[in-house]
Amino acid sequence: MKPPPFVYCRPGDLAEALAVLAEHGDEARPLAGGQSLVPMLNHRLARPGVLVDIGAIEELQRMERRPSDWLIGATVTQRRVERHRVEGCELLRLAMPYIGHRQIRARGTIGGSIAHADPAAELPAVALTVDATMVAAGRDGERAIDASSFFAGPYMNSLEDGEVLSHVIFPVLPSTTRCSFKEFARRKGDFAVAGIAAAVDITDRAVSTARLTAFAIGSNPVRLTGAEEALAGRSLDAAALTDASEAAAAEVEPWDDIHGSPQYRRQLVAALLQRALQEVAP
Amino acid sequence: MGSTFELGARPVYTGTHVTRAQDDSLLSGQGTYVADLHRDGMAEMAVVRSTVAHGRITAVRTAEAAAVDGVIEVITAADLTDVSPYPNFASAYTQTPGTFPLAQDKVRYVGSPVAVVLAEDRYIAEDAAELVVVDYEELPAVISLEDALEPDSPRLFEDWPDNRLLDLQPDDSEVAAILAGSRVFRRRYKMGRHTAMPMETRACMAEVRDDRLHLWCTNQHAHIARTTLSYVLPVAERDIRVVIPHVGGGFGLKQHLYPEDVLASWLALRHRRPVRFVEDRAEHMIAAAHARDHMMDMEAAIDDDGRILAIRVQVVQDLGSAEIFPGAWCPALTTAAHMTGPYDIGQCVVSVAAVTTNKTPGGSYRGFGVPEAVFAVERFIDEIAQEVGVNRLDLRRSMLLQPEDLPYTTASGALLDSGSFAESFEKVVELAEPAYRRAEAQYGADPQSRVGVGYAVLFEGVSPTHHGASAHWAGHESCSIEVQPDGGVRVASGVTDQGQGTTTFVATLAADALGVPIETVHVELADSDSTPYGLGAFGSRQAVVGGGALLLAAGEVRDKVKKIAAHMLEATEDDLVIEAGRVHVAGSPAPAVTMAEIATTAVIRTIDLPPGMEPGLEATARYEPELMEHVPDENGRINPNAAYANAAHAAVIRVDVGTGEIEVLNYILAHDCGRVINPPIVDGQIWGGIAQGVGGTLYEDLRFNDLGQPQTAFMDYLVPSAIEMPEVVIEHFESPSPNTPLGIKGVGEGGTVGPAAAIGNALAHALAEFKPQIRETPLSPAVVRAMIGDQQT
């Protein structure tokens, strides 16, 4: 568990980082908090020739409340967001304690987790649920990528060679939106076996919009459109919860691993969605 | 014997909270582990391991790796021409897997060492190890225990008739006759595969100094390791020194001399430079011994009240490839010896098979066959109670050994000379039933929760003979005590310390037995050059046999101290007492002579010794428990342990019926390890044992796919953390053994052996409405959720 040899550099600004990344093409990998990449290096699952540590770049550490959203720089640590409480981004706040352990969140970054696109990770699910925007910086400038098209498979994103995720824009949700984040992991802090992120807008006791995401069940987080439709216009009573849970269990196509079969994950999705909806019900 | 095992007249440390000797250094990062050892010119090893579960090696290409800058040598089995396979001392009744440090013709598990890269550092060694190419002709792999039993199953060892390394079929005619005339209840139980996950992985560093091989390693026995090295390497035993520095947990897994220990030694001798191997966690998952993986087929003749009249069991243990631990099958024998539980079941016959499969070799792990037996017996009793319609507690009460039954010899020959079987059980019931009712009150209204309570009562053989596993060593321990001229005491013992407090109990007993302040005692362990030959750490033995040897040696020293003091004080020895490092006449503290004055007389001013007395103030003693048997009698009966501890466990659990997750709310345990030397250390042992028991029951699972590829990386090997640990209540009973020094029994494994049974029974209770079949561990959320089915949600 020793990494193969690599060149390490720690540029002081984004332009320099982009220049190094451009120079080395797919030989180079940005390093943020290192909570995923370093273990992968040690297991020799990733073998970049050049590691570009973006931790010293100040412009990637911005965290700003703007009129209708939060702009969070790629290397803002998860712990910083957790402590900040990010008013208006309830779902993000609820998800933070589920990310690893506190020590991991102290090093792990918002952008690192999203770019890493681990199927079991919390932040991609939040981003997908609230329609966050990923902003990629390249030598030709910035490019905005919708959450729905950012995640391109397990551990794959749609950044191009030479691009780096510079920040993420999380929209502030209306005050009528109620959020819940439910995750089942074998131990506290473990990777999820299944999880649900929910942001449900309720007006006049009825669901106007339901945004429901399941994660840790397949390549990337998925929106539960069937369940969302099942709730549309309804009050969150027992029958609606059951219909949504059944729809969710039917629409997901979970994968199989040591912690659970597809059948078990369907049951988890149903149970967790049920609990999430109970929580958001007025 | 009697008096020879006495503590001094006024023991002040034994039974009290003596702070653990190494806490300051270990907890402040000042410990010295193998990974902390550095030597000028030290090279490091990386092992090239098999990537296939079963295959014939057709070529090992090392040239490219050998050419890497910084690589010293790349070796394969063909280079080890002067290495001997480990001798099989049990060949009369077992097959021989022919344990050798590198795979010779075949590989039999993923992780099997095939080649070694020796390089200037571990980074280079790993870079080069990637370049070693091994060609295999793959063979069909035998993965499950059931497959291994099939007559037409592929064989791991082609010269064996089948995959059975051990196959003991005792005469069962008496039990068969009872079964034939009775109501019979049958169940099959299985315990999954898990193992120890010590914070420190395996490690060793070999160096040649003054033409002798010095091996610094994490092994649990300095002397057995030394002797074993002399069997396999062309080095005389006198030219080998084994030293065990600080160790970050052993748990049985570090009992074995591993291939890497031999390889590092061989390379150090060959290159005359220090060679270190520090196992990484990925290697640990596949190349450190695995454990458990037992199947138990139980048949009982029962009466109308469910009482067991006779029991017949077939135990099958999956050994993996059996290429690490020569006595890998011994846990199955231990399981067999615990199949009656602490119950008055006069008739019990157990057949034992141990089979080889293409998985990581089995080894020893805390509990060593007992958790398997307790799980099977205690689940079996709950299932009988349910079947017959009697209360599970009353069924236990009707069979449990009562004080008047003791001493009691079990059907397998174990001599239960003392214990608190019924009393500890009643204590646990008294504490657990209210805890269960509290849980019911808290969660009863929650449709997503079910709560339950489960019990397990057990005895556990401790301080076993080593002969069961090695067919070679027996059961003794040894100790040397020397009082130095300033009155300070040096105690050297064959026991070893993996962090559990061995050093502390040695110092405690020595201080009390000699009547000196504990600060004046220096303890030396685990260096084969400076300690007498002992068998080290296994089977919860060290306080019993290590304590016995120490007390014998201390008794000799104490007698001489009194003789010298009597001469100096012109008093009669029998009137003297030793306390706080001073000797005086009982009842009159002055005049007194100090230990320093006595020792100075004994060692330096020998002209002042009583006429004719030999100089020196030291003794070496060895202790082998008299009633411990090493070889079974003609009926297969044996009393293989010096003592038997007992305990009752109870678990109160909550099951989340939506996710299948089990939360252990309360764990209540009443244990009896005879006389307690250090209460917090005993509690710590139990706590840690419960954590490992809970881990094996709910979380830890070493899985393989159909090709024999390991499926459990460390990330998925779920050792419980503090958050997963329940609230634990420990109750103490002390039933001293009349047959051990001071009545001490062992406690090292006591917490580990009960959780599978207690939690399994609690789960059956909690989910009674779903009629679950709880016959295997681990009880993962997915497994539990499947028991609930779709009847709920």
Image: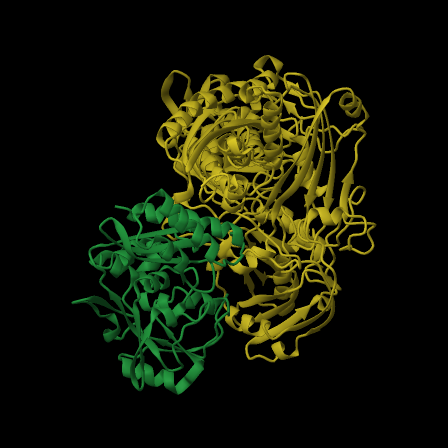
Chain colours: A green, B yellow
When the figure is inspected, residue A136 is found, relative to residue B686, above or below; the finding is below
- Residue B355 placed where, x, y %? 73, 47
Horizontal side, residue B357 vs residue B587: left or right: right
| A195 or B543: nearer the viewer | A195
Extreme residue in the left direction: A67
Quarter placement of the C terminus of chain B: top left
| B667 or B74: nearer the viewer | B667
Residue B167, quarter of the rendered image: top right
Residue at the image point whose x is 54% and y is 24% from the top: B743
Quarter placement of the N terminus of chain B: top right
Horizontal side, residue B785 vs residue B325: left or right: left
Horizontal side, residue B154 vs residue B726: left or right: right
Q: Can residue A185 be seen in this view?
A: no
When the figure is inspected, residue B573 is found, relative to residue B18, above or below; the finding is above
When the figure is inspected, residue A204 is found, relative to residue B283, above or below; the finding is above
Residue B169, quarter of the rendered image: top right
| A143 or B551: nearer the viewer | A143
Extreme residue in the top direction: B404
Horizontal side, residue A42 vs residue B139: left or right: left
Marks counted in the figure total: 0
Q: Is residue A27 visible?
A: yes
- Residue B132 placed where, x, y %? 63, 73
| B235 or B110: nearer the viewer | B110
- Residue B470 placed where, x, y %? 70, 43
Residue at the image point whose x is 64% and y is 54% from the top: B360
- Residue B461 placed where, x, y %? 61, 31
